[in-house]
Amino acid sequence: MTPIAASHPGKLGDALYSLPFIRYLANSTGFPVDYYTSTYCEPMRKLMEYQSCVNSFTVLEDFVIERYDIGCQPWLMPIPDKYSKVYHCGFRNVPDRMLHQYIAAIHGIYEPLAIEYEYPTLTEPLSNENYIVIAPRGQTSFRQLFNEIAENYNTVVIGGKDEYTGRGRDCTGLDMLDTLSILSKAKGFIGLMSSQLVLANGFDIPRIGLNGVWSDMRHAINTARNIYPKEPEKITLADIKFMLDN
């Protein structure tokens, strides 16, 4: 029997940020963790089950999400009474730091945790190509910029199945685990503050979050590889080239 469990009700990106803490638990205890979540996070299943730190992935079908602010609420999930320890990773209040570190701090862990993923090796035809990844999320105010990027770079488009805008190689609608494999060979990422950026944060590439200026930046990943333009509506293709090259 696995002695520990962890839970997070969602949303997708927020729940993915619990993985660094889960990996920490598994490494510290020597036991992979049973993970519980809501039906909202079913798309994470294949990714989570692939991680060696996760023993099992269970969707609590009877758990009802009441609100979608501060992640998904309520944060306390009904975990079976068979564990020596259960770590609830849902947000108790508005996070005051990077989300993966906030989750760790809930449980008294303050050391820096790495955002990293295990994923399959990318297969042909992309494995030998030089490309960047964009996640335009469909028809946003940045559509023209994303189209210009796709016309000037070898571009792979990721995201939900309805988020392809007609330019670049369409890899939308893929499972998150397959998306990780694509990101593993990318030369850069350009997108919005979404679950796709959370995936991209696991790789040592330039990561441009175009709408970061409109978000609570206490939650954003703050590294030299993360770029959040202060005036994204004024960004040009030349600016994008500079960000990717530097």
Image: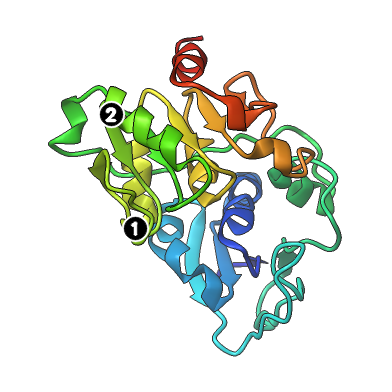
Q: Tell me where residue 208 appears, x and y as whole percent.
A: 54, 29
Q: Residues within 10 Å of mark 2 (few under 14, many from 20)?
A: few
**Is label 1 in a helix, a strand or a loop?**
loop
Residue 223 occupies quadrant: top right
Identify the residue at horizontal 53%, vertical 77% (top origin): 39
Compare residues 28 and 197 and report the one nearer the observer: 197
Q: Tell me where residue 215 appears, x and y as whole percent.
A: 72, 44
- Above-or-below relation of 149 to 244: below
Q: Hey, what amino acid is under mark 2?
A: Glu
Q: Hey, what amino acid is under mark 1?
A: Asp
**Is label 2 in a helix, a strand or a loop?**
helix
Identify the residue at horizontal 55%, vertical 44% (top origin): 198
Identify the residue at horizontal 59%, vertical 26% (top origin): 234
- Above-or-below relation of 61 to 50: below
Does label 1 or label 2 sit earlier along the sequence? 2
Quarter of the picture containing the N terminus is bottom right
Q: Please name the residue that numbered disc 2 is placed on.
A: 151
- Which residue is most to the left? 125
